[in-house]
Image (cartoon, rainbow, N blue to C red):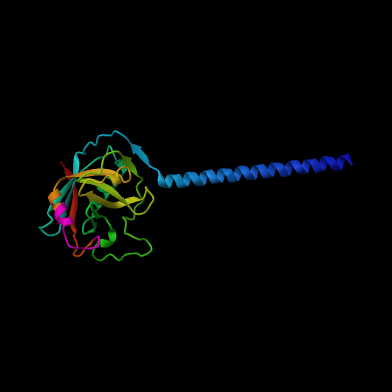
Amino acid sequence: MLKKSLIFAALLSLIALAACADKTTKKTSNTNSKSKNANQTTADYKKGVTPIADPEVAVFEMEGPAFGTFKIELYSNVAPQMVARFKELINSGYYNGIAFHRITGTVVQAGNAYTKPGVTPDPQKGEGDSGRPDVPAEFSDIPYDTGIVGAARLGQDVNSANAQFFIMLKRESQFDNKYTVFGRVIDGMNNIRTMAGVQRNGEKPVDPVRIKSARIESR
């Protein structure tokens, strides 16, 4: 009888340990899941950073004389990963032929690969990206004012910047701390405003406002 009691007590102990282990596993799994979701909605944030212009600038030449050219100074000390991606895409010729596909009273936006002539959109992918991995958000407290260049996102995930960028036409405080600032137009802002004045169907220009070429050059 004593032997049976000991065996029964041992079985109860094993069941209790198994239940505890299962509970711990579930707790760990939930924590990891929360961490993963948090990574999708949070980002590094730099406060009090003063933008320092790179020794190189990005120069965009537009198709047609009406839109001319514009130059962007880049802030590697603020958003090193986005600046590196921007330079990489420019040097690869990615932006050549791409059109500004979104124009509002606040921004002009470009970088959608599907706006290139001869490129067929993929309905499964939404807006066209560069085919490269997304760039993590690099937020700062630099205000979104006229001429500031920001990294557009391809979704709600703050870490979904890729190739699209936008240029501010005016101050917009609602953009602050929500999109990566990585540059500013230092020449040709009047040409940007001319682009913003084209006829549109909603936010899309009726006639393409197309980039002829983009290059990186010394200041």
Task: Please tell me which residue lies in front, 214 or 155.
Answer: 155
9 left or right of 143 in image: right
Residue at the image position 30 percent from the left and 41 percent from the top = 80
Q: Quadrant of residue 25?
A: top right
Is 72 located above or below residue 105 in the figure? above
Q: Nearer the viewer, residue 15 or 201?
A: 201
Q: Is residue 147 left or right of residue 43?
A: left
In magenta, the rendered stretch is 192-203
In the rendered image, residue 60, in percent from the top left (x then y), is placed at 17, 51
Residue 82 to residue 124: above or below: above
Q: Residue furthest right?
A: 1
User: Residue at point 28% right, 62% down?
Assistant: 114
* 196 magenta-colored: yes
Q: Position of residue 175 (x, y in %)?
A: 29, 46
Residue 98 appears anywhere in the view: no
Judged left or right of residue 179, residue 200 is left
In the image, 208: left or right of 20?
left
Residue 189 seen from this side = yes
Q: Quadrant of the C terminus?
A: top left
Q: Quadrant of residue 21?
A: top right
Does 198 appear in magenta? yes
Relative image position of residue 148 (x, y in whole percent) = 22, 45
Q: How many marks?
A: 0
Residue at left offset 22%, top offset 49%: 167
Q: Quadrant of the N terminus?
A: top right
